[in-house]
Image: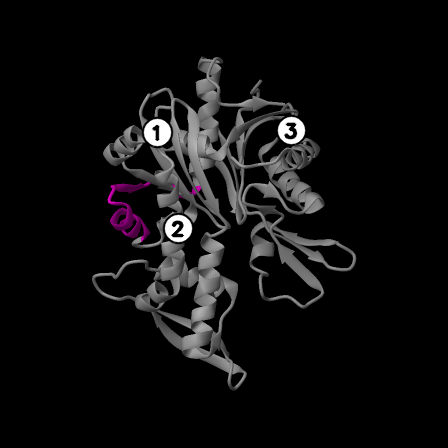
Amino acid sequence: MFNSEIAIDFGAKNIKISSVNKGVLINEPSFIAVEKKSREVLATGREAYQMLGRTSNKVLVEAPFAGGRIKSFSEAEFVLNKYIKRISTEKMFLPAAAVSLPFGVTETERIAATSVIENAGIRKIAYIYEPLAAAIGAGMDLESDEAFMIADIGASKTYSAIISKGKIIAYNEINVGGIAMDNEIIKYMRKKYDTEIGFLSAEELKFTIGSITPREKPIYCHVKGKNLKEDLPKDIIVTSEDTRAALSGIAERISASILRTLSDASAANVGDIAKNGIFLAGGASLIFGLDGFIAQVSGMDVHTMLNAEEAVAIGAAKAISLWNKNKNLDLFDID
């Protein structure tokens, strides 16, 4: 089945492609810039991403994937083609791939994903649910009788799942993630400082001084924007306490979603999770203090994975190795 042994994770911000033997090969923006009227592609990947908020109204910059689903068919195909070609060679067989999909994916969404992947040159496709891939990436033993919990805080969504004996037994998903955090920072800057900042500036603030719980000492960052009262450039100093105020509502929604998943589990499963802790994946899980906030709300230990942003892609590639050794493992749905 897996001649080339690659795994693909479609992200709302970045697409990740990993290999069983070589690890993560691609982790780059999945954005595309097109001329609105003609739909001509002007840029893709990082180049397109850097154009966010900096183009005329004649240019559309967007990510064709949303929460692991296909949002724009032709643009998604174009982006995936670009990255598949980068890792392929002329002598290489068209690859087979393990592709992660959301647990709640519909048949229509799956058919759309299959079409895009096949048109990008993938000969054979095996689908794996994102929570299972993330669990494998976290090093969990899916054959264990114990229950484990994963919470993946990505760009456009957060899901939490409880897994036991290789099955997802409880699941909850909300459309809140890193992009929502950026938007909240933008709104906060408007309200407190009468300043409009761009999406990329908000993202920089999130990762450099973003905080969910108080830091021992506040840290600061300069940011440039537009004064909304005078329509002139403005340079202000933003503190980590500013970002904490901006992101508090998002943190509460994420933790509430995790608690809802826990409420669907049996007492025995919750006992297992209390022993093993909750594992966090996804790029937005790396925001300072989010793990501690979830631990405080849930009363459980919380572990942020070392490769949090790439956990699903890494886990999907590891799943290939597991399946190659034991084809009785019920990890994949093969097309």
Residue 282 drawn in magenta? no
Q: Residue at x 44, y 37 (%)?
A: 171
Residue type pointed to by label 3: Ile
The crowding category of the residue bearing disc 2, from other C-alpha atoms within 10 Å (few below 14, some 14 to 19, many at least 20), is: many
Task: Please name the residue that numbered disc 1 is placed on.
Answer: 139
Mark 1 neighbour class, 10 Å CA radius: few under 14, some 14 to 19, many 20 or more:
few
Q: Is residue 300 magenta?
A: yes
The kind of residue on which mark 2 rests is: Ile
Which residue shows up at 37% across the image and 19% down it?
143
Residue closer to the observer: 141 or 123: 141
Q: In this picture, which residue range is highlighted in magenta?
A: 290-309
Mark 3 to mark 1 CA distance (whole Å): 28 Å
Judged left or right of residue 180, residue 75 is right
Residue farthest to the bottom, as pictured: 230
What amino acid type should be assigned to the residue bearing mark 1?
Gly
Is disc 2 placed on a helix, strand or loop? helix
CA distance for labels 2 and 3:
35 Å
Is the residue under label 2 in contact with that under label 1 (CB below 8 Å)?
no
Look at 35% across and 40% down and name the residue there. Answer: 263
* Point 51% across, 63% down: residue: 199
For this view, does 334 lie left or right of residue 146? right
Element class at badge 3: loop
* Extreme-left residue of the structure: 216
- Image side of residue 192 versus residue 124, left or right: left
Q: Which residue is mark 2?
A: 254
Mark-to-mark CA distance, 1 and 2: 23 Å
Q: Nearer the viewer, residue 294 or 139?
A: 294
User: Horizontal and vertical percent for residue 262?
Assistant: 35, 39
Q: Is residue 275 left or right of residue 306?
A: left
SS of the residue under disc 1: loop
Residue position for label 3:
122
